[in-house]
């Protein structure tokens, strides 16, 4: 056994030094590829990570009544980063022919030809594989739900070709971490988890419609479908209605979970961000629509802070 350990240590040292030598020899190339991969997975635009992270934390905190297991918390935070990154790559693989004709996306690594489709598939597959390795440390129900999450993440990028409701599928893909969080923390997926998922799907339709409003003219030319096109001139009114439904659903959640004043104060402040977003998109200017989309990070964070403080205060009362 000692001899085997020594051989393994020697082998590891040899591999390490050879990899280090290879890196130094090809350092400029490696740096350039890693830079392109970072752009491919949108590390330069972390707002997407937060838009997936906040509802995940909502679910985890409600499921754990404010005190999630540390291992579950770590797995889900890392899982959010990995799956959002993989989702970006899958989305670019599906859209590379279209992205080349849209001003905002034509410089993306795949659309510009700086990264090949094979490279992108390897990156996406690697990220999903690592995420699955993480989730295998959870209970069987969570693992089963994880495979549904992979299917949703893989299917969503193609929905904009066939339906005007791709934002709905994005909401399911982004929100599926909610039932997974309940499963990991409690071993079950109660009714309240599905209520929170509904809130997240509605919220996703809100912010991704704002995002789609940025590219609406380009999307009309190349045949991409979205709720921004479906809603047409009624887009602002429909977004306001859906925002109201999000708030109603989150109020219902607060009552069912018996949350206190801190949560509802947070929800009240968050509703102010919704009003601000409506003012930004009112004249449909692309730069302001993008600003409204980005502002949704503050909405998600404010709801979470309300949840976090409420559980802390109630636990100390």
Image (tube, grey):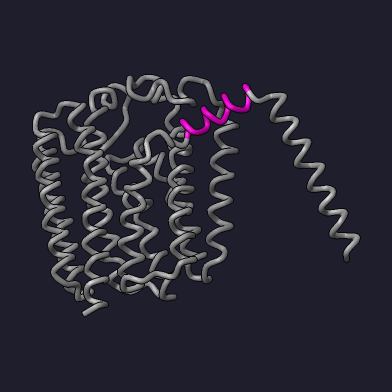
314 relative to 154, above or below: below
40 relative to 268, above or below: above
Residue at horizontal 10%, vertical 49%? 272
The x and y percentages for residue 47 are: 33, 41
Tell me, yes or no, whether the highlighted magenta stretch contains residue 247: no
Residue at horizontal 74%, vertical 36%? 19
Q: In the shown orientation, is residue 211 left or right of residue 252?
A: right
The x and y percentages for residue 288 are: 17, 30
User: Which image quarter holds the N terminus?
Assistant: bottom right
Instruction: Identify the residue at the far right of this view.
Output: 3
Residue at horizontal 19%, vertical 76%? 258
Res 227 seen here: no
The magenta-colored residue range is 28-40
The one of 35 and 314 positioned closer to us in this rendering: 314
The x and y percentages for residue 42 are: 42, 35
The one of 31 and 9 positioned closer to us in this rendering: 9
Q: In the shown orientation, is residue 65 left or right of residue 16?
A: left
| Image quadrant where residue 126 sits | top right
Res 225 seen here: yes
Residue at horizontal 39%, vertical 25%? 98
Q: In the shown orientation, is residue 293 left or right of residue 146?
A: left
User: Which image quarter holds the C terminus?
Assistant: bottom left
The one of 130 and 4 positioned closer to us in this rendering: 4
Tell me, yes or no, whether the highlighted magenta stretch contains residue 30: yes
| Image quadrant where residue 197 sits | bottom left
The x and y percentages for residue 273 are: 14, 46
Instruction: Identify the residue at the far front of this view.
Output: 316
């Amino acid at each position: 056994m000692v001899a085997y350990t020594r051989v393994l240590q020697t082998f590891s040292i040899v591999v390490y030094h050879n990899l280090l030598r290879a890196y130094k020899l090809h350092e400029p190339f490696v740096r350039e590829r890693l830079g392109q991969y970072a752009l491919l997975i949108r590390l330069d635009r972390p707002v997407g990570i937060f838009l997936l992270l906040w509802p995940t934390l909502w679910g985890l905190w409600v499921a754990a009544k404010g005190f999630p297991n540390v291992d579950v918390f770590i797995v889900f935070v890392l899982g959010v980063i990995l799956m959002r990154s993989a989702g970006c790559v899958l989305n670019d693989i599906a859209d590379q022919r279209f992205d080349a004709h849209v001003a905002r996306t034509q410089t993306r690594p795949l659309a510009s030809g700086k990264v090949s489709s094979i490279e992108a598939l390897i990156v996406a597959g690697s990220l999903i594989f690592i995420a699955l390795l993480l989730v295998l440390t959870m209970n069987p129900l969570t693992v089963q739900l994880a495979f549904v999450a992979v299917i949703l993440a893989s299917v969503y990028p193609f929905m904009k070709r066939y339906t005007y409701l791709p934002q709905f599928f994005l909401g399911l893909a982004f929100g599926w971490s909610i039932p997974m969080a309940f499963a990991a923390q409690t071993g079950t997926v109660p009714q309240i988890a599905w209520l929170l998922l509904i809130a997240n799907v509605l919220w996703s339709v809100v912010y991704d419609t704002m995002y789609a409003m940025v590219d609406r003219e380009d999307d009309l030319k190349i045949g991409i479908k979205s709720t921004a096109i479906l809603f047409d001139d009624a887009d602002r009114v429909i977004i306001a209605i859906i925002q109201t439904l999000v708030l109603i659903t989150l109020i219902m959640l607060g009552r069912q979970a018996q949350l206190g004043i801190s949560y509802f104060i947070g929800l009240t402040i968050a509703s102010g961000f919704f009003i601000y977003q409506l003012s930004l998109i009112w004249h449909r200017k692309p730069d302001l629509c993008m600003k409204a989309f980005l502002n949704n990070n503050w909405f998600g964070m404010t709801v979470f802070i309300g949840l976090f403080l409420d559980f802390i205060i109630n636990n100390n009362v």
